[in-house]
Image (cartoon, helix red, strand yellow):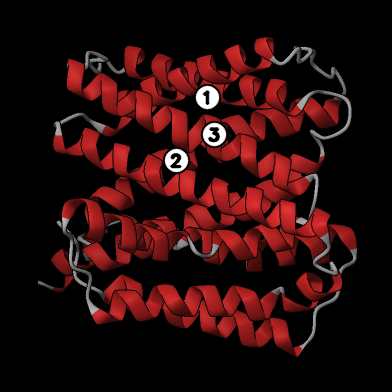
Amino acid sequence: MILSRLRRPSADVLAVAGVALCAIIWGTTWYAITWQLGTVDAVASLTWRFGLAAVVIFAGCALTRRSLRLTRGQHLAAVGQGAFVFAVSYSFTYAAEAHVTSAIVAVVFAALAFLNLVLFRLVVGQKASRAAWIGAGLGILGVAVLSGGEALGAGFDARALTGIGLAFLAVLSSAVGNYFSWRGQQQGSAILPQTAWAMGYGTAMLALYGLATGARFTIDPSPGYLISLVYLAVLGSVVAFVVYFAVARARGYALASYISALTPPIAMVVSVLFEDARFGWSAAAGLALVLAGQVLLSRAPKLD
């Protein structure tokens, strides 16, 4: 009996492990993205990133003989997911970081779990538990405390307000994209083929947008750019998003999107290790609030 329990981790344990893995990966992508800035247009870098990620998943499905066929309804869901999760959201995120620091964008992204609860309540009538609402709220409060000093230091002038507005549009787009991912799940599509097609559609949209706006589709041959591109495509996109959508299907999109509240603490550790950053007691207090929210969300009942 004991061995059986050891071999079969509970759904909560698997969900928390998935959230932790995604948080570690996406928490380090903030630093990896800085290696992509400056020489290549942002829309081109995003096109290379998600295009490579889509090829990896398509190839993986082909090698494992997984069917890539989707029904018309599943394709429509993948189009919506690709548009809002990969094309629109990331475009707004890169634009926001041109106006404000990544820490402020992270503060705004902490609202994703809360927005998911609101969106799924309004659109599909899902009723979240009190623990889920409190957990999502603690995530917002925790990241606000964690990054409060940097946010206040931005001055909140017109440039900062523009950046915050763009970041909010990115978060809202991600929430809408999560809805389309859920629609694909309701249509019966498997995670890997739906994610592959969604990334493919998102890549096509980014490429068309780049062509329409005159972006130059170049690539930086330097080791730093290429290493960051592979890292962002394979780990930051393929692994993280597949695990993210698996957690979302198993335990709900509110818990999965709480990753957006957990990534700033990981990004802080990376900043300390590689950028000689220093943080005080407010960061510790914010991290405690974030982890408390994680516990509440992980224990909240799954939303169907």
Residue 6: percent from the left, percent from the top? 23, 67
Kindly indicate whether the residue at mark 3 contacts the one at mark 2 (C-beta within 8 angstroms).
no
Contact? badges 3 and 1 (CB < 8 Å): no
x then y, percent, for residue 285: 63, 88
Relative horizontal placement of residue 132, taking residue 235 as reference (left or right): left
Label 1 environment density (alpha carbons within 10 Å; few <14, some 14–19, many ≥20) = many
User: Gap between marks 1 and 2, in whole Å?
Assistant: 10 Å
State the residue position of label 3: 88
Q: Nearer the viewer, mark 3 or mark 1?
A: 3
Amino acid carrying mark 2 in the image: Phe
The numbered dot on residue 265 is none
Mark 2 → mark 3, Cα distance in angstroms: 16 Å
- Which residue position is annotated with label 1? 53
Residue 241 badge:
2
Mark found first going from the N terminus, 2 or 3: 3
Q: Answer above or below: position of 46 versus 113.
A: above
